[in-house]
Image (tube, rainbow, N blue to C red):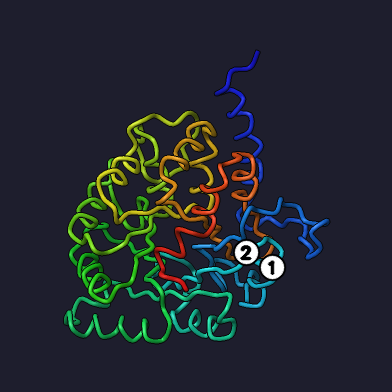
Amino acid sequence: MISRRDFHRTLAAGALAGMTGSLFSSSPELRADDSEKNIAKPSVPYIDMHTHIGQYVSSEKNLPASGLIKWMDENYIEKAVVLPLVSPESTLFLQPPELVLAAANEFPDRLIPFCCYDPRHAKHVGNAALINHLKRYKELGAKGFGEHKVGLDFNDPLMMKVYAACEEVGLPVLFHLDTIRGKDKPGLPHLEEAIATFPDLTFIGHGPGWWASISGDVETLGGYPTGDVAPGGAIDRLMEKYPNIYGDLSAGSGNNAIARDMEFGREFLIRRQDRICFGSDYLAPGQVVPQFETLQNMDLPLDVQEKIFRGNTIKVLDLS
């Protein structure tokens, strides 16, 4: 007899198989005909909280807005948030907010733009000027701030200055957290200071450090832990205590968090069903996105699927 935990670990191994190659490894093209698709049709169309366009680390891997739309059509994704990247630690090829806003203007029914600003640029900028700068982006259509992926401590005074402006303007912050960008420690004390200081600002967690913190025994915020998840992780603790912290399931880190221990992962998603948003971090043609298979294997209740696949993003971003 195989135990329930071993059964779920076997499922996890299959779900993680798609992550063994490079992030940019090629995969067969999915075709529009439902009978030819490589993924199962979800209970409701996805809204993707985390995508990019342009170039990331390779000049040969360019994803135009039209390419993103094509991939969305092939994977039952109705709308997608497109995130700029403006900090030198975030990417080799910067992706300014203007690129994202232009893409959203081209596909207004499909793409949801965010804006971003490196806090180090705000060092000599007054609070009023920074607020007006973000208000302008919001007037141009930005629904949030991010990807906030900066080589500073998460609670650095310059970072806190930007959070204050985002709270004032009403822009949710989607952040990356690890040992290099949005730096913190096990237990996430820097993040907790920020979410406690700005209770009216919605924070959306992403990245290896954030998702490693699903487990109570995490020792480093820079990797992809394996094995069973220990109870008492910082994510559960923070979500229990603070109503303004959410999680974005995107990238290898998000998939690893719920697939490394499928039993815990499923229970976590059901327990935190009001705080988790589907995301892919799709950013290059041919990229494998293992979240589709992982979520399919979990067989979540339909009401939970609807919240995670789209409902929570609609709520957080106030989408009509």
Instruction: Tell me if residue 67 comes above or below residue 204 in the rendering.
Output: below
Q: Which mark is residue 25?
A: none
Q: Label 1 is placed on what type of residue?
A: Asp
C-alpha gap between disc 2 and disc 1: 6 Å
Residue visible at 62% across and 64% down in the picture: 77
Q: Quadrant of residue 111?
A: bottom right
Q: Which mark is residue 73?
A: 1
Question: Is 41 positioned to the left or the right of 178 in the image?
Answer: right
Residue occupying the far top of the picture: 1
Q: Which residue is mark 2?
A: 77
Residue occupying the far front of the picture: 303
Residue visible at 64% across and 44% down in the picture: 296
* Disc 2 secondary structure class: strand
Q: Nearer the viewer, residue 69 or 184?
A: 69
Instruction: Tell me if residue 316 comes above or below residue 184 in the rendering.
Output: below
Question: Is 240 positioned to the left or the right of 284 in the image?
Answer: left
Q: Position of residue 40 (x, y in %)?
A: 71, 50
Q: Position of residue 197 (x, y in %)?
A: 17, 59
* Disc 1 secondary structure class: helix
